[in-house]
Amino acid sequence: MNMLINAAGTVVADALRGMAAAHPELVVDAENRVIVRRDAPVAGKVGLVSGGGSGHEPLHGGFVGPGMLDAACPGEVFTSPVPDQMVRAAAAVDSGSGVLFVVKNYTGDVLNFAMAAELAEEEGLRVASVLVDDDVAVTDSLFTAGRRGTGATLFVEKIAGAAAEEGAPLERVEAVARQVVTGTRSFGVALAPVTTPAKGTPTFELPAGELELGIGIHGEPGRERRPMMTSHEIADVAVDAILADLRPDAPVLALVNGMGATPLLELYGFNAEVQRALAGRGVAVARTLVGNYVTSLDMAGCSVTLCQIDEELLRLWDAPVQTPGLRWGR
Amino acid sequence: MNMLINAAGTVVADALRGMAAAHPELVVDAENRVIVRRDAPVAGKVGLVSGGGSGHEPLHGGFVGPGMLDAACPGEVFTSPVPDQMVRAAAAVDSGSGVLFVVKNYTGDVLNFAMAAELAEEEGLRVASVLVDDDVAVTDSLFTAGRRGTGATLFVEKIAGAAAEEGAPLERVEAVARQVVTGTRSFGVALAPVTTPAKGTPTFELPAGELELGIGIHGEPGRERRPMMTSHEIADVAVDAILADLRPDAPVLALVNGMGATPLLELYGFNAEVQRALAGRGVAVARTLVGNYVTSLDMAGCSVTLCQIDEELLRLWDAPVQTPGLRWGR
């Protein structure tokens, strides 16, 4: 597998140098591995901090900016960042209004964010944490006790980020984030495996002509392997898996997400099938986002995430956002 | 090669249905294969129209919207759209101020846009055309007499689009587009081949451990094949190839573009090397864009495009844009 890198050991450091050059509106501390919006701390504003292993870009570093995250901590590829990064990020964005950690449910992330919260509180910061665990495919997979956190992270960061940007207090920002987690579910499939720079060969075997249903964003095993299916069939399986777990009684936001190597042309075609499947099951879609947002390096495949909303969550979703990976409005 | 499709023959139609569902701000005519901004024709505004084979998304359909294209015509995968589509698009966006066709230099596109311009003029429209031919790698490749049109298309569509949005007359919009073409050069590499839905297997052989320097966006042959290189070395080759052809005497806009399957993490690392190479050769960079913008389905690899600017072009680049693939500002 050819990679556009210098060496496996420098991939994250190189990427951070490249991010710094492309995004002068961010402060990228490549040495300490913290990405912070340049105007942080913003007076009177709750600081939103997330992070996790690298390899899922634009998540999380690409979601730093007005209306979304105040800071992100990238770990090594598919490896949790360390508590020092998180404490540093919290200190950089805290204006005295407190900090919310958005944590994907992977064992390393959970432990390290918990330790970072303790350390930050010892330094006098108010810290709350929200755990994202939206993936209905499996429980207790590799790296995870309980459900994995995947596409819902984008909705939590965007919607809680909008609340924080408006000046909502920590308790309210946390409550909004929890409401999003409670109402959001995901399901993903792999059409080809992922190769990490450190390993240099695929992390799992997936013969041509087969797909893995319920894949994790690190290539963790899913529910089952089947002969290759059509886009129509995959959309039915993904939507049914989600609706079996949470049947929305209100409109949803839909994320039709690419794992990295699946062409945008195919993702749009898949979106047509997802919309058909949702309409046929009586689920109303308020907004749809199609693209590569929560990725797994060069994995081919896709995921569907549905986020049940009310008027207030929709208003926060539509609010302006200015980040490298997601931007609209003013 | 597993694909997220229903059938090779429905890929473009399915994608257009999915685009329509995701982007209510666009009018997607899936039957006639024309994508138009919803408020077209805009009174007093020159209409900007482009198009080409599908498989390069977000180019061109994802660049339709205020501040960029008024309409796009997608052909079949890697196949020129037909004149009927172009005439229909021109008629839909013409407000009486004329229409500019942005044409990538591939034989089919050139012939069909020329025929469409004749037909539209017979119907009373004023039409100008600009040919984009920025790829320094080779001349007279497959599909092309002269140089291929690649990454410069994004700069032409954004910058001429901003001029049109401001109400500049057709002659001025055309002149701005020509200035961008004249000052822009690109060079791309492939790390893994592309597979089209119709063929189902790679369109060319590229053994692991080798890369193709000077690749085209349809997998057309480049300059040479070499043993795999580092990101550092690839950046030097790409930048030197561009500067050997056009030595900027002013700052540049830099596009560090992914071909489709190369992870964003790697593209950012590559950007660090491109910036190093440019700084070492005395080229100042005013703005940098990193991501998958002018793609080749699932090809792995990247390209570099440099666009020499002056104050006016930079102002037009920075002007607001609201499209699915590129958006910033108001």
Image (tube, coloured by chain):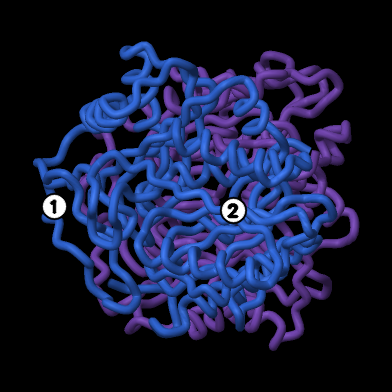
Chain colours: A blue, B purple
Q: Nearer the viewer, residue A116 or A244?
A: A116
Mark 2, secondary structure of its residue: strand
Residue at 85%, 38% in the rendered image: B171
Residue A324 circle label: none
Is residue B138 in sight in this rendering? no
Give the number of the disc on residue A208: 1
Q: Residue at x 56, y 41 (%)?
A: A177
Compared with residue B117, is residue A8 higher up or lower down, i.e. above or below?
below
Element on which disc 1 rests: loop
Give above or below for B256 relative to A279: below
Q: Position of residue B76 (x, y in %)?
A: 38, 34
Write down the chain letter for disc 2.
Answer: A
Residue bearing mark 2: A128
Looking at the rendered image, the quarter that the C terminus of chain B falls into is top right
Q: Position of residue A193 (x, y in %)?
A: 24, 58
Q: Is residue B201 visible to us here? A: yes
For residue A301, side relative to residue B167 (left or right) = left
**Which quadrant holds residue A304?**
top left
Left or right: B168 in relation to B30: right
State the image coordinates of residue B197 (x, y, percent, origin top left).
27, 41
User: Relative to A289, does residue A45 appear above or below in the rendering?
Assistant: below
Q: Nearer the viewer, residue A101 or A122?
A: A122
Q: Chain of mark 1?
A: A
